[in-house]
Structure formats: C-alpha cells, structure tokens
Image (spheres, rainbow, N blue to C red):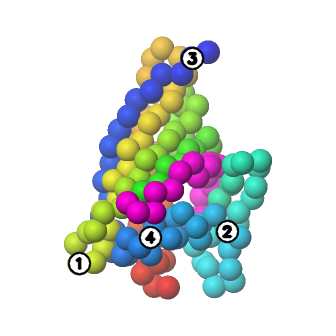
Amino acid sequence: MSLNVITVEKEYTLAVPRAKLFKFLTNDLHQPPTPSSNAIHSVQHFGDHKKININVSGGETHSVLGKLEEIDEANFGYKYSVVEAKDFPDKVEKTTHNVKLLEGPNGGTIAKDTVSYFYKGDVPPTDFKAAQDKVHGILKHLDAHLMAN
C-alpha cells in the first residue's frame, strides 16, 4: 500500500529562549527523567523509536512514540517522526515534523513546524485539528515548565 502526503505548516510563539527549548527538545526530552523533572514522566525504548510520556495539565500523561531523525544545531532545527500518539488521526500512518526555532519576541521563541501527514488510502484525512491542538497544548505546558525551571 502506498502512502500519500499532506503537508501543513504551524507556528507557535513561546516565552522560553530558543537555545533552552532546543536543548530540551533535542536532548533532555529523550533522556530518562531526573527527580527534578516534572514535565517528563518516563522514556521507553522500542528499537530506534522512543515512547516519551509527558506530564501535561491536570495530571494527564500524553504519550508519543517517535524518533528523532535529524538535528541541525547551527540553525536550531530538527526533524522527528511520530508513529503513535493520542489524537493521532485514524488514517495517518506517521507524521514527520521539520521544526525551526527562531528568535521570538522578548527573548522567546517562534517555533515553525512543517508537519507531513503520511496517510493510508485514497481519501485524505481531515481530522488534524485535535492532533494540532494537542501539540500546541504540550508545547504550552513545556514552555511553562522550562520557564519555571
């Protein structure tokens, strides 16, 4: 079965400085949590993929099974793929996120996320909103966590 692709661009404005956010997203997030980390619940390894369980608002834990594909330290960019997550659209096989972190207002960050949805079948899925809202919620939670720590 061949996969088709839809690409969507999203932009998020965060208060945390981009160097701190970049280090967290490309390094710290993929390590076992430290006792002082209240953002990451656990990290499990499944071959070359990792299941990262992130504590979000209200005590909810959100799990993402994916792989960090590339890191571009010079340009504060990275690429990761996701094969499983809460609110993952039913017809989607995987997503890839090409993220660039830019200098934002007041020392913060503008995260530009180009998401490619690799979907099964001839009819493209249209239920991206829940997944995009979940990404935004996780980023807001991580932003608050990183600003406090």
- Graded by Cα atoms within 10 Å as few (under 14), some (14 to 19) or many (20 or more), the crowding at tag 3 reads few
In the figure, residue 35 lies in which quadrant? bottom right
Asked whether residue 90 appears in the rendered view, the answer is no
Q: Which residues are magenta?
A: 53-75
Residue 39 vertical placement versus 13 (above, below):
below
Which sits earlier in the primary sequence, circle 2 or circle 3? 3
Main secondary structure type of the part rendered in magenta: strand
Q: Are marks 3 and 1 in contact (CB under 8 Å)?
A: no
Amino acid type for the residue under numbered disc 2: Gln
Q: Secondary structure at mark 1?
A: helix
For residue 57: magenta? yes
Q: Say which amino acid is labelled 4.
A: Leu
Where is residue 119 shown, x and y percent of the image?
51, 26
Q: CA distance from mark 3 to mark 4?
A: 35 Å
For label 1, the residue is 106
Residue denoted by label 4? 21
Which sits earlier in the primary sequence, circle 2 or circle 4? 4
Q: Earlier in the sequence, mark 3 or mark 4?
A: 3
Instruction: Tell me which residue sits at (46%, 57%) in the image.
Output: 72
Per the model, the C-alpha gap separating discs 2 and 1 is 29 Å
The residue that label 2 is drawn on is 31
Q: What x and y, as percent, mark residue 108?
A: 30, 73
Disc number for residue 2: 3
Instruction: Describe the element under mark 4 as helix, strand or loop.
Output: helix
Q: CA distance from mark 2 to mark 4?
A: 15 Å
